[in-house]
C-alpha cells in the first residue's frame, strides 16, 4: 500500500508576502548621558534581564544605576562612536541590506528588515509596519547565536506580546539560535584565518581567546543553556581551526553588579596571561555578530590595556562577522531553511 504523501508545510494566509526580521540587542541613540539613560532604563527594566523582585530592584535602578552609570558609559560610547552613529546599528543596517540583496539575487522575494530589542527601531514598530504592508509570514531571527533567556527569549517574547495585540496577526516563526550552525562556525573560522593571514600566528607563547558575553551564574545553574552553547561553539570553532586546547581559552565578559557571573572572567584571563608572560593573544567574540561597545571598547581598548600592563606584548582583537560575505551567506542559508513552505518566489 503506497504511503500517503506528506502534507505541505503551512503557508501564511493573506497575500503570501514573506519577511525576515533580524533582531539585535539595541544601542543608545547618541553617546550622551540622557540617551544612555533612556536605553538603560528600557534594558534594565526587562524582568528577563534583571530577575530581582521589582520592589527591591526599582529603588536601586532609579535611585543609583540610572543616576550614576549613564555618565560613565557616555565616555566609553564616545570612544567608539562614528560619524555614521552607533557601530552596532550601522553594521546591523548593512547586514540587513546585504541579506535582502543576496536573497533577491537568488530569486527569492523576501523582505528583510531589522529591529532592536531595546531602542530604535523597536520590535513592535517594525512588526506593525510589516503587517500594515501585508506581510503575513514573518521569520523572527534574533542575532544571538547562543540561546539565552535574557536575550533570545526576551526578543521573541516582545514579538509574541505584540502579536497578542493585533486583530489580523501574521504567522510568526522563530530561529531559536545557531550555536552549532555549520555556516556560522565556518564564517567565524574564516575570519580568524583572514586575521592570521594578515598578522601571522605564533607557534608558541600565544593564545586565541574566545570571549562571550557573561550572564549571572545562577540562571546557568537552573537550566539556562547559554553556557553550554557557548562552549559548544568554541569547541566546534577550535576543531575547525585545528587548534588544541592549550592554545585556546573561553571566557565571559561584561559582568555587571556584585553577584557571581559565569567564569572565567575575560578581564582575569587577560591579566593572568599577561603575568604568565604569554607574548600575544588574539581575541574573538563569537557571540557578537556585529562590533559594538563590548568588542570595540571593552575588549579592544580596556582589555588590551589590562593585558599589556600585566606583562603581555601583543594584543589583537579580531573584528566581528559584521558584513563578511560568508556571514551573510550563513544568514541566507539559515533564513531559507526556516522559510520552507512559505511563498518566497
Image (cartoon, rainbow, N blue to C red):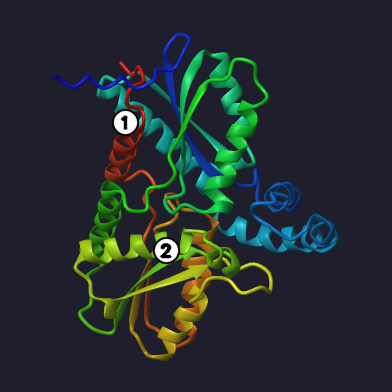
Q: On the rendered image, what quadrant is the N terminus found in?
A: top left
Residue 202 is situated, as x and y percent measured from the top left of the image, at 23, 77
Mark sitting earlier along the chain (1/2): 2
- The disc label shown at residue 123, or none: none
Q: On the rendered image, what quadrant is the C terminus found in?
A: top left
- Residue bearing mark 2: 228
- The disc label shown at residue 336, or none: 1
Residue ranking furthest to the top: 15
In the image: residue 58, left or right of residue 236: right
Crowding near the residue tagged with mark 1, few <14, some 14–19, many ≥20 C-alpha atoms within 10 Å = some
Q: Is mark 1 on a helix, strand or loop?
A: helix
* Quadrant of the rendered image containing residue 53: bottom right
Name the residue: 61% across, 22% down: 128
Instruction: Estimate the spatial distance between the alpha carbons at disc 1 and disc 2, rounded to whole Å.
Output: 26 Å
Name the residue: 25% across, 52% down: 186
In the image: residue 159, left or right of residue 50: left
Residue 287 is situated, as x and y percent measured from the top left of the image, at 43, 56
In the image: residue 80, left or right of residue 180: right
Amino acid at each position: 500500500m503506497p504511503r500517503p504523501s506528506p502534507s505541505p508545510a503551512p503557508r501564511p494566509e493573506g497575500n503570501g508576502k514573506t519577511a525576515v526580521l533580524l533582531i539585535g540587542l539595541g544601542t543608545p541613540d547618541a553617546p550622551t548621558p540622557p540617551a544612555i539613560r533612556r536605553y538603560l532604563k528600557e534594558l534594565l527594566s526587562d524582568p528577563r534581564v534583571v530577575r530581582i523582585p521589582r520592589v527591591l530592584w526599582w529603588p536601586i535602578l532609579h535611585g543609583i544605576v540610572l543616576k550614576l552609570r549613564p555618565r560613565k558609559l557616555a565616555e566609553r560610547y564616545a570612544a567608539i562612536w562614528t560619524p555614521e552613529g552607533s557601530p552596532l546599528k550601522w553594521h546591523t543596517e548593512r547586514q540587513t541590506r546585504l541579506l535582502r540583496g543576496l536573497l533577491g539575487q537568488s530569486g527569492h522575494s523576501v523582505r528583510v528588515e531589522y529591529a532592536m530589542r531595546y531602542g530604535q527601531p523597536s520590535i513592535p514598530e517594525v512588526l506593525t509596519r510589516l503587517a500594515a504592508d501585508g506581510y503575513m509570514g514573518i521569520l523572527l531571527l534574533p542575532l544571538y547565536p547562543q540561546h539565552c533567556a535574557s536575550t533570545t527569549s526576551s526578543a521573541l517574547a516582545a514579538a509574541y506580546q505584540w502579536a497578542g495585540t493585533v486583530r489580523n496577526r501574521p504567522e510568526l516563526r522563530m530561529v531559536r539560535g545557531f550555536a552549532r550552525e555549520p555556516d556560522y562556525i565556518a564564517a567565524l573560522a574564516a575570519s580568524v584565518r583572514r586575521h592570521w593571514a594578515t598578522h601571522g600566528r605564533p607557534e608558541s607563547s600565544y593564545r586565541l581567546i574566545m570571549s562571550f558575553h557573561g550572564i549571572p551564574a545562577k540562571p546557568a545553574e537552573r537550566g539556562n543553556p547559554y553556557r553550554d552553547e557557548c562552549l559548544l561553539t568554541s569547541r566546534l570553532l577550535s576543531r575547525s581551526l585545528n587548534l588544541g586546547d592549550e592554545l585556546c581559552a573561553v571566557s565571559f565578559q561584561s559582568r555587571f553588579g556584585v553577584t557571581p557571573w559565569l567564569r572565567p572572567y575575560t578581564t582575569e584571563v587577560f591579566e593572568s596571561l599577561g603575568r604568565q608572560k604569554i607574548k600575544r593573544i588574539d581575541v574573538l567574540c563569537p557571540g557578537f555578530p556585529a562590533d559594538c561597545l563590548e568588542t570595540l571598547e571593552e575588549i579592544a581598548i580596556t582589555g588590551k590595556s589590562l593585558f599589556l600592563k600585566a606583562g603581555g606584548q601583543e594584543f589583537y582583537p579580531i573584528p566581528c562577522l559584521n558584513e563578511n560575505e560568508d556571514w551573510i551567506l550563513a544568514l541566507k542559508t539559515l533564513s531559507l531553511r526556516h522559510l520552507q513552505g512559505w511563498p518566497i518566489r
